[in-house]
Structures are given as C-alpha cells and as structure tokens.
Amino acid sequence: MKQSVFITVVLVVAYIISLVIFFFVFGNPANFKGGDTGGTPINIFGQIYKGGLVVTALMTISIMVVTFVIERLLSLAKAKGRGAIEPFVKKVQSLVQEGDIDGAIAECNKQKGSMANVLRLALERYNVVKNDPIDAEKKLAEVQRAIEEAMMLEVPLLERNLVALSTIASISVLVGLFGTVLGMIRAFQALATAGTPNATELSTGISEALVNTAFGIFGAIVAIIGYNYFMTRVSNFTYMIDEATYNIMQILTVKSK
C-alpha cells in the first residue's frame, strides 16, 4: 500500500514539475524568433517545446526514473547498515561460537542493516527455544523458520520500485515512439501541402519527432541501467545474507548436539 502511494505521489509531482518546465521554461517566448511560440525556435529549449505535449509525459517518466534511482541508492545504503558487512558477520559468528548469543544480538542492533535484522530475529528465536524441552532438530527448525520469515520481510524492501523501473523502461520507448509518429505525421502533412511546403510546419514536425525520440531513449536507457544495477546489488546482498545465515545455522547445529 505504501509503495503504491509513493509511486502515485512521485507520478503526480513529476507531472506537475514537467508541466511547469514545459510551459514556463521551454515555452518561454525568449526561446523563439520574435517572441512567438508558434514561430521558429532559436535555442534547444525552443526545440524541445516544439516536441509537443507528449514531451511532458516523457519528462514525467524521466523524473520518475531519476527519483526511483535515488530512492534505491538511499534504501540500499540503509539496508547495508553501519560499517562493513564482512567484519560484522565474522564478529557475530565468533560471538555465537562462544555462546554469547546476547552479545551477538547486541551487535546486530548496532549494525541495523537488513542482514543484521535477519540474524537478530534468528538469534532471538534461538534464545527463546534453546531451553525448551524439545529435541535439537525442532529448535533448529524454529530458528530456520524465523530466518525465512525475516527474509520475507527484508527482500521485498530491497526489491521495492524495481518493477516500476522495469515497466518504465518499456513505457518510455513506446511513449517516445508515439511522439515520433505524431511528429512525422505533422512533417508529412507539411510536405503534402499544395505548392511550396510550409517550412515552419515541416521543421516543427521534425523537431517533435526527434525530441520525443531523444526523451524516450533517455528514459529507457536510465531505467534499464538502473534496473540491472540494482537487481545485481540485491542478488549479491541476498546471497551474502543466505551465506551468513547458513553459517550461523551450522554453528548452532554443532552447539545443539
């Protein structure tokens, strides 16, 4: 629910920003010959304005992509926790090996990353069941269940908004293509005019086609690179969590015998 609200808010804000930039920056009369927005543009801003209203949709997509990339960077940095992961894992394993479960839990509370959360829940569950009058296998099964529950909570947080990035990568190209087609239609209409083609209409159509193509490709490139980069980071991070929890389980298995 929170994710859908976040995406909706980003969409609305990005669209409003796009409209403001399109009409008041790109559509500034100073960007056109004679101050006429229907005339010939004299700089790149005017050329972008000639791309038409489809540009606002593409700008919205681009702003959303950049927002999601920044959000993922911040979220994954937070998920990493405080300090390097490798020394943290070694210290927790060492404390568990020594039987200092409370000390290991305290280290997890200090680290505050996704891996620390998973290990903490596993160790807390072990603390609860270690004195129960049940056999070792059932105790370890309870700890494994705690790890699985923790992973179900942490992994979706690591993968949040990645589907949105993947979707935007496809949509951006299609919206850009739609704007390109509209621009080419306008250009051909200018060419089809009887007598000498209207140079302004012809250039407007070509500008619309090229601007929309450029924005569509930009949004797709950033979204694809961002999606692949973050998927790789999430995969590596979940692998490290799996390896750490496996080692902890092995230590607990030995200690339970």
Image (spheres, rainbow, N blue to C red):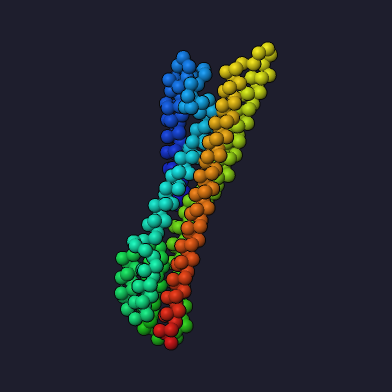
Left/right placement of residue 70 relative to residue 173 reads left
Residue drawn at the location 49% of the way across and 66% of the way down? 239
Residue drawn at the location 47% of the way across and 69% of the way down? 242
Q: Position of residue 13 (x, y in %)?
A: 42, 38
Q: Position of residue 135 (x, y in %)?
A: 44, 86
Q: In the figure, 101 relative to 35: above or below?
A: below
Q: In the figure, 166 relative to 191: above or below?
A: below
In this orientation, which residue lies closer to the viewer: 84 or 17? 84
The reply to whether residue 81 is visible in this rendering is yes
Q: Quadrant of residue 187?
A: top right
Q: Quarter of the image containing the C terminus? A: bottom left
Q: Which residue ends up furthest to the top in the rendered image?
A: 195
Q: Quadrant of residue 150?
A: bottom left
Residue drawn at the location 42% of the way across and 80% of the way down? 252
Q: In the figure, 146 relative to 194: above or below?
A: below
Q: Position of residue 51 (x, y in %)?
A: 54, 28
The reply to whether residue 152 is visible in this rendering is no
Q: In the figure, 21 relative to 62: above or below?
A: above
Residue drawn at the location 42% of the way across and 75% of the way down? 248
